[in-house]
Amino acid sequence: MPFDLSGRIALVTGGASGIGEATCYTLASAGALVYVADRELDGAERVAAAIRSAGGQSAAMRVDVTVESDCAEAADTVTAAHKRLDVLVNNAGIGHVGTIHQTTGADLDRLYTVNVRGVFNMTKAFIPGMIARHAGAIVNTASIGGIIGIKDRLAYCTTKFAVVGLTKCLALDHAMDGIRVNCVCPGRVETPFVKQRLKEYPDPEAAYREMAATQAIGRMGTPEEIAASILYLASDEAAFITGSALIIDGGWSAGT
Ligand code: NAD
């Protein structure tokens, strides 16, 4: 069976909502035991319980990816229970709307701390175990805003370009350690993250239509469509893929 993760241990950050939540369900359906890691423990527990009630294996953990000791504790917990982590999905991220005029230094630092340091912290915590076993797949959630600039998204794009760079450097540094590192670059995906952004516009309905029209195919993506690509990159079918930034944007950037 393709994309089979039976017997694999996976951890998804930001697993309590949106793309992360869909990724937890998709990886669990493929047979993985999934740790749902999120700073919102209630949400993580809800997702883990849904997986278990569908017959899968899952546990929730409270992890704030910006806190190094949380990341180290997560690695200790997973290693103590299973002696390994096969798949790490660094998905937790936050957004911000604004040009440089509407972006404070504190906004930029906040986004950098979650979107970049968060990926760095989790990878630093788990990669020694992967190196020791000479195996592992890491998938980071970047964005199409890590490939092309987006108007009014100064801080967000800055951090997502950094996630693409981090992905490529990790891939090069650890290719001979048996570890693959890739990222997905979604266009607009209808999640609580985007719904929150829409509230920041004076006319949210007009903004919704405009956001949908940004994609060449005229709609936003679904969390499940992004999760399917994350599963692919995590699976053995992607054994020859490392350092890739997979664009899943409904054609948004096709003309650029
Ligand atoms: P979401 O807001 O629905 O979910 C994000 C989850 O991350 C939440 O459960 C939140 O609690 C968690 N989180 C936030 N900060 C955290 C932290 N410090 N530690 C642990 N967990 C934390 O968002 P989403 O739309 O599913 O986005 C997920 C990822 O996809 C983000 O990295 C985002 O930048 C990226 N992305 C989203 C879109 C989109 O259109 N939705 C497009 C491209 C990329």
Image (cartoon, rainbow, N blue to C red):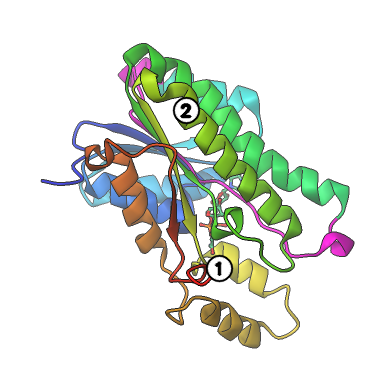
- Asked if one can make out residue 204 in the rendered structure from this viewpoint, the answer is yes
Q: Residues within 10 Å of mark 2 (few under 14, many from 20)?
A: some
The answer to whether mark 2 is within 8 Å of ligand 1 is no
Frontmost residue, 96 versus 249: 249
Q: Are marks 1 and 2 in contact (CB under 8 Å)?
A: no
| 171 w.r.t. 155: above or below | above
User: Quadrant location of residue 152?
Assistant: bottom right
Q: Is residue 205 left or right of residue 6?
A: right
Residue found at x 66% / y 61%:
149
Residue found at x 59% / y 31%:
120
Magenta range is 79-103
In x, y percent, where is residue 45?
Answer: 44, 45
Q: Residues within 10 Å of mark 1 (few under 14, many from 20)?
A: few
Of the two numbered discs 1 and 2 on the same chain, state the one appearing first in sequence.
2
In x, y percent, where is residue 129?
Answer: 41, 16
Label disc, if present, on residue 256 of the rendered structure: 1
In x, y percent, where is residue 150?
Answer: 66, 65
Residue found at x 67% / y 55%:
157
In x, y percent, where is residue 163?
Answer: 58, 42
- Assess whether residue 42 is covered by the magenta stretch: no
Disc 2 marks a residue whose amino acid type is Leu
Name the element at disc 2.
helix
Frontmost residue, 89 versus 232: 232
**Quarter of the figure that contains the C terminus:** bottom right
Q: Nearer the viewer, mark 1 or mark 2?
A: 1
- Assess whether residue 86 is covered by the magenta stretch: yes
Spatial separation of the CA atoms under disc 1 and disc 2: 27 Å
Name the element at disc 1.
loop
Disc 1 marks a residue whose amino acid type is Thr
Label disc, if present, on residue 172 of the rendered structure: 2
| 98 w.r.t. 70: above or below | below
